[in-house]
Image (cartoon, grey):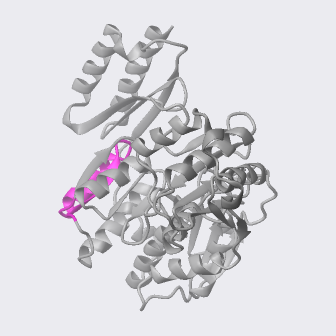
Amino acid sequence: MRKYFGTDGIRGRANGVITPELALKVGQAAGLVFQRGDHRHRVVIGKDTRLSGYMIETALIAGFTSVGMDVLQLGPMPTPAVAMLTRSMRADIGVMISASHNPFEDNGIKLFGPDGFKLNDAIEREIEALIDSELHTKLAGSMSLGRAKRIESVHARYIEFAKRSLPRNVTLDGLRIVVDCANGAAYRVAPETLWELGAEVIAIGVEPDGFNINRDVGSTAPAALVAKVRELRADIGIALDGDADRVLIVDEKGQVVDGDQLMAVVARSWKEDDLLTQPGIVATIMSNLGLERYLGGIGLSLARTAVGDRYVLEHMREHGYNLGGEQSGHIIMSDYATTGDGLVAALQVLSVVQRSEKPVSEVCHCFDPLPQILKNVRYRSGEPLRADSVVTAIEHARERLGNGGRLVIRPSGTEPVIRVMAEGDDRGLVNDVVDEVVDAVTRAAA
């Protein structure tokens, strides 16, 4: 068990869990771990639009400069842009200050190695050990302190990077696009990228005030985008989250298209263009069984991992896949990025739409999702999943579903909650199965 790091960096209530003191120590510890060689070391720091970003950024800068690292401040930038710029600018480490799709009260610190990938467990444990050590004994001398400066050209660099992910013969001419930037990190770069590629762009969620990130906008609250697409009779809506590493699509009819459908679209296109490095893709245990069946029908496999884009990416890297993601909209295309990139994923879908000359509702409806029901059971202490009555209920539920469905039961990694999910062809059966397991867990947790 790690003390500070979760499945996606360090995250918690700003000025509660994520305090200036912690950020200072993270900067010092990470700076020490990534000082390798005798060159002048440097770190790039990006952030989303949360009010607490100023506080955390300042503390991180103090930490990194105190151990002799120079700091390049990027300002508000998407998480995938920070990962890309870490590599592009030959930084020794990259930092993104964001709590992704969480409300503004939360914040987090995500770290990237010099290769642009999120850190592995071993390096995170090494940083944690240093955080709890006598860091004051490891500081740089007065002549070796780092410097900090703000870099102004990074928005243009990321926009050009995103545009190059679109095939050269494809433009967005003739498309009316509504893009929802969740009042977050992509509020400048996403609309400009789409406009430069030829689209008519209507942008919402582009007025961040420090408090309104993800509030009734973005990929976790698509109702505003649905309404705007219908109002303007747009061809497509694109919803990003607060740090723009995930995306959902709204078709011209106002229907929401999730990450499973988007992975199916890209997988089919890349298979036809012989771009897949393996005959399949990687997703999590939460992806719909309909996706797995659809892929099987076109000769592709679906490898499943634990929930979390880091586990998807680890499996992709280990087994040579170049496409993976999550139902929530994290789409990882390792030919282009080292993490989920909502804008680049949207551009790949737009490329398919433009080349097919079909409406988004046709292109992005690859399969009918199977009925999928998810319920949560909160508990106070103990391990209710180990109770004999729960084990028996789970076995019985799996027998009832048979080969026509799936049952996934997992404890949350962030709160005392057990998640019970089932899916299958028969909605009534799926609902009964979930209720049966939930009842057993609830009684065991009482």
Residue 287 within the segment the image draws in magenta: yes
Q: Residue furthest right?
A: 209
Q: Is residue 10 left or right of residue 302?
A: right
Q: Can residue 250 be seen here?
A: no
Q: Quadrant of the N terminus?
A: top left
Residue 237 location, x and y as percent? 58, 68
Please report the bounds of the magenta region as a residue range: 278-300
Q: In front here: 129 or 313?
A: 129
Q: In front here: 67 or 230?
A: 67
Residue found at x 56% / y 35%:
4
In the rendered image of this protein, does residue 439 appear above or below residue 229? Answer: above
Q: Residue furthest bottom?
A: 169
Q: Is residue 437 left or right of residue 222?
A: left
Residue 168 location, x and y as percent? 42, 90
Occupied quadrant, residue 236: bottom right
Q: Can residue 32 be seen here?
A: yes
In the rendered image of this protein, does residue 289 appear above or below residue 180? Answer: above
Residue 40 location, x and y as percent? 57, 67
Residue found at x 51% / y 79%:
161
Residue found at x 44% / y 67%:
337
Residue 418 within the segment the image draws in magenta: no
Residue found at x 63% / y 81%:
156
Residue 417 location, x and y as percent? 51, 25
Q: In front here: 123 or 339?
A: 123
- Number of on-image labels: 0
In the rendered image of this protein, does residue 204 appear above or below residue 369? Answer: below
